[in-house]
Amino acid sequence: MRLDKLLANMGYGSRKEVKQLLKQKAVTIDGVEVKDPAMKVDPEKQNVSVFGERVEYVEFIYLMMNKPQGVISATEDKYDKTVIDLLDPLAQHFKPFPVGRLDKDTEGLLLITNDGNLAHNLLSPKKHVPKVYYALIDGVVTQSDIDAFAQGVELEDGYMTMPGHLVILKSAEQSEIELTIQEGKFHQVKRMFEAVDKKVTYLKRLSMGSLKLDKVLELGDYRELTEQELALLFN
């Protein structure tokens, strides 16, 4: 990899700004000052430093966010704040994107990465990656709803969903439930409850595959995935 590309990719500025660092004798490779921006380097085998601080090369980032309401699952938008807007400039530098989407008024687990292969594996309909949601429902959820979801329900456009696993946490005029589905159709959870004449008033995603929302993450906060979480995702 070219030295200027490495430093630019790691957030040390544009390639023009990297050249200024080289002119300032701020960059060393294995302790030797370098000035050639086109120099080939292997950051895994060589010690590249800027102002004496080693450059830790990272190709991909994997972030868990507790998405708040009011922001959209997109990389950019003319009108609304996006989940990428909530990231610090260094994280934004890697040009990450949300894996899948949560509705603007939905909270909870959102994976943000720049690893396209992982995103494809998690979102591919053939993979049937389970997603668990917590919801408040306007209406009394009953055993008949559990049975209906277990068979799959027909949405208003005629689409028949895959079976979903519905658990009633509290059955009342304002019911509390957990629902596990293996698809990600547009507004799917809301539409599934509409199919049984009920309305979702609050929705939060708790997990996606092996990845579970960290309970200590406040709304709008995020953190890098742990090595254990990454290992489970790539299994």
Image: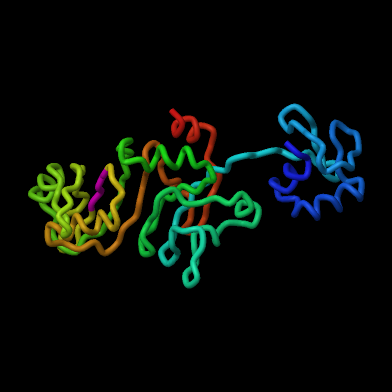
Residue 180: within the magenta?
yes
Residue furthest left as drawn: 144
Quarter of the image with the N terminus in it: top right
196 falls in the magenta region: no
| Colour option used | rainbow
Measuring from the top left, give residue 95's x and y in whole percent. Answer: 58, 51
x and y percentages locating residue 178 in the rendered image: 25, 48
The residue sitting at 46% across, 31% down in the picture is: 234
Q: Does 73 sit left or right of 179 as displayed?
A: right
Q: Position of residue 102 (x, y in %)?
A: 38, 56
Q: Is residue 29 above or below residue 24?
A: above
| Type of secondary structure dominating the magenta stretch | strand
Position of 187 compared to 167: left or right?
right
Q: Residues in magenta?
A: 177-181
* Residue drawn at 38 percent across, 64 percent down: 104
Residue drawn at x 55%, y 50% is 96
Farthest residue, direction bottom: 79
The picture quadrant where one finds residue 42 is: top right
Q: Residue at x 51, y 58 (%)?
A: 75
